[in-house]
Amino acid sequence: MAVVVVLVLVAVGSVLFHLLSPWWWTPIASNWNYIDNTLIITFWITGVVFVAVVLFMAYCVLRFRHRPGNRAAYEPENRKLEGWLAGGTTLGVAAMLTPGLFVWHQFVTVPDGAAEVEVVGQQWLWSFRLPGADGKLGTSETRDITPENSLGLNRNDAAALDDVVIEGGELHLEVGKPVKMLLRSVDVLHDFYVPEFRAKMDMVPGMVTYFWLTPTRTGTFEVLCAELCGTGHPQMRGTVIVDNAADYQTWLSQQTTFQQLQAKAGTKETAQAGNAAPAQ
Amino acid sequence: MVDIRHGTGEQIGPAEVEDVELYHPHSWWTRYVFSQDAKIIAVQYASTAIAIGMVALVLSWLMRLQLGFPGAFAFIDAERYYQFITMHGMIMVIYLLTALFLGGFGNYLIPLMLGARDMVFPYANMLSYWLYLLAVLVLVASFFAPGGPTGAGWTLYPPQAVMSGTPGGNDWGIVLMLSSLILFVIGFTMGGLNYVVTVLQGRTRGMTLMRMPLTVWGIFTATVMALLAFPALFVACVMMLFDRILGTSFFMPAIVEMGEQLQHGGGSPILFQHLFWFFGHPEVYIVALPAFGIVSDLISTHARKNIFGYRMMVWAIVIIGALSFIVWAHHMYVSGMNPYFGFFFATTTLIIAVPTAIKVYNWVLTLWRGDIHLSLPMLFALAFIVTFVNGGLTGLFLGNVVVDVPLSDTMFVVAHFHMVMGVAPILVIFGAIYHWYPKITGRMLNEAMGQLHFWVTFVGAYLIFFPMHYLGLIGMPRRYYEMGETAFVPASAHTLNEFITIMALIVGAAQIVFLFNLIWSIRHGREAGGNPWRATTLEWQTPETPPRHGNWKELPVVYRWPYDYSVPGAAEDFIPQNQPGATSHAPEGAS
């Protein structure tokens, strides 16, 4: 009878663990509470199914275990029962999928007027770029990367010159403002991951990927890399600080633009910068 | 609707082709080493798979030691850690699970269960094993190569897999890994063609497709899928090998590595992911379908009851097999592919849950009103259902694209796939070994050791992987050598990691008991007789146990489906498939 006891313990214990254990998601800091809601619906539906199946098994073992003289019933098929079970399952699956697809539609639809922020990953640090006064990110190319131009911005693109470049530093975002995160990598796959934002996306060399969010509370959040990127993967950390509007503007005004960085580098190493330019 | 159980008044026609004489071995070498007997090849496949599986087990101990007690073991540095997880994953998925289910159980059971003398191409079957062995040896060689094995993660995603920031990336590791996989696919293709042709052409008289045991249906469908899926892995490996050795750029865009421009450009890392998962997702079912089939037969035999809804079970296997080819990109929701793919792949993925759930219902409904013998195979089958249902349900989280976004790349994924395609199929493998060992050796495995093995493995594995989901829910990423100081990870999560590590050590140790039992029982096990479980399928009706080369004196003729257990009016509670005549008490039609 140990089997029956253990099966019941598995069913009941798993539910109790879920309810009582201290391990749960981090308090959310973005608009993606829709994701959390879909997750909760899924927990409920799957939890009921799991408990029902395991307890039913426990009952069967208890009730129909072998005793001398027992004989099993002979029932090859029961199309009615099979039909009901298949129908019920389809409903349950639809109940999870439907809200999931609605939320996914929101996830892939970036709202008009979302600010653009670029995140650039490389082994093993994060860099960021914000559009400058013109509100537009300039073009960039991995081939244009040099020690002085670590993000490979296009020097001949006026839109790039006023871009704010933050190398290996902290990114600040403004609370309540939708932002489209444009993701780029210069070497291997990375993944921009802030658990409190819920959203994440891989960064792939050779292309620009994206996701969007609206930060909903101020605070300091840790950025992790969520896609294996070599031995330094766990050390690839960064920081995102969500500010109110005033703090954000203060911070933004202290940042350096691409043009300023170039000027700084140019005065030091004019020769090298001159060599790199014709390659474009 | 046709009565699936036994064609009443059906005439079994005479044989269409003459019985062929097999190539009989002339020496010890051709009998036991370069054997063409599927049963010997099966044991060779299984032994090799278990041996390399033990390596993977030790690797899992080492990685868990690092996760539970970071920094306590100086020799586990970051490079080694990534090598351990990579090799553990690849060995378990390909070289253990695939090889054991198809090469091991497939070879042993297909000819015997179908009443054939052997596989239809015995020589190619032998080559299949030797290529598999070569693939394993090449894989093992990478442990001793300069730079060690690859540490790219078992998914081998480029560009990092072939770059210097990854262990083995610009050394021998990745080259040997890819070469080994290429050899494995070639070897598997030889075996796989054999299994498919044997099922289609080698069945004995009366063994219609709808009278095949579900074990054969599972292995057959999985093999067809593997023959279609492995070529994608094959070309992906060849292309990456070219990128690595010849400097091509199939998967390599313009890259700046540590400040230096590489001589690559124009390739697509995501192309590799599509190829890999076009193989990789069917691969999940290549492992799962044989397990589904085998567990159906274990439950039926040990509950002394016909499997419930046989036809539905067959169709579910076939439909799952087909659907599994159009769900692959659910592994790539956050890969950066066009996000609109998410709608399609989430829908197909969740549709697969329906035939899968039907299988679960039919297993538990087979228990209902059964005569359940709590033998070791039955215990493992029950444990399989628990872990499979658990892992299958968490698949509904990860398959539902938007729910996947926060959970992707976290420990939740690790917990999910270990539960559903690690623990669950391996529990079936154990159940199957306890079930068929008496046929293979003529002796029973020791019951006391088996009970110890079962309880520690089932309860321990559940305690490892169930709480692990919650580490992922916190947000703890997978493939982290160390979490270090991370604000959102509470101290209690580290305690949980210690607990998981200790359980992993205990569960691993229980497998040593199992190995000992396997060896000890060859000589000291209780004599089994020909049909210790009183089972209906043909492999239990051989004239000799273990069956000799050629399996049968006269080829058996099949008169009924494989699930005539507890037929009302029959004297015994089972009627073998080769027993002629309708039963005295013909039951109502199944339709």
Image: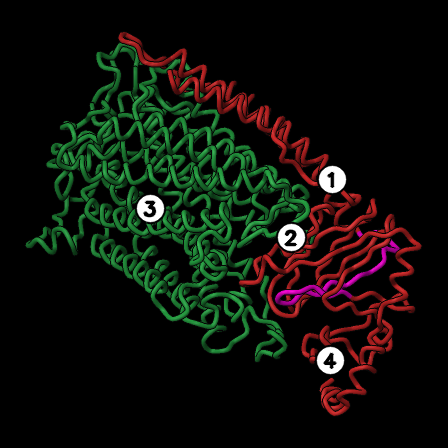
Chain colours: A red, B green
Quadrant for the N terminus of chain B, please: top left
Q: To which chain does the residue with label 3 belong? A: B
Q: Nearer the viewer, mark 1 or mark 3?
A: 1
Are the residues flagged by discs 4 and 1 from a single subunit? yes
Left of A194 or right of it: where is B349?
left
Chain to which mark 4 belongs: A
Q: Residue furthest bottom?
A: A271
- Considering the numbered disc 3 on the image, is that residue within a helix, a strand or a loop? helix
Q: Residue A83, can we see it?
A: no
Q: Residues at badges 4 and 1 in contact (C-beta under 8 Å)?
A: no
Q: Is residue B71 left or right of residue A73?
A: right
What numbered label is drawn on residue A148?
A: 4
First to last magenta residue range: A110-128
* Of marks 2 and 4, the one in the foreground: 4
User: Does A9 appear in magenta?
Assistant: no
Task: Identify the secondary structure beneath mark 1.
Answer: loop
Q: CA distance from mark 4 to mark 3?
A: 56 Å
Mark 4 touching mark 3, by CB under 8 A? no
Nearer to the camera, B111 or B397: B397
Q: Which mark is residue A27?
A: 1
- Indicate which label's residue lies in the foreground, 4 or 3: 4
**Pointers 1 and 3 in contact (C-beta within 8 Å):** no
Q: Residue at x 54, y 66 (%)?
A: B160
Marks 2 and 4 close (CB-CB < 8 Å): no
Badge nearest the viewer, 3 or 2: 2
- Find residue B102 and name its label: 3
Mark positioned earlier in the residue sequence (4 or 1): 1
- Residue A116 magenta-drawn? yes
Same chain check for tags 4 and 3: no
Say which chain tag 1 marks: A
Residue at numbered disc 2: B334
Query: Which amino acid, by three-letter code, is at mark 1?
Result: Pro
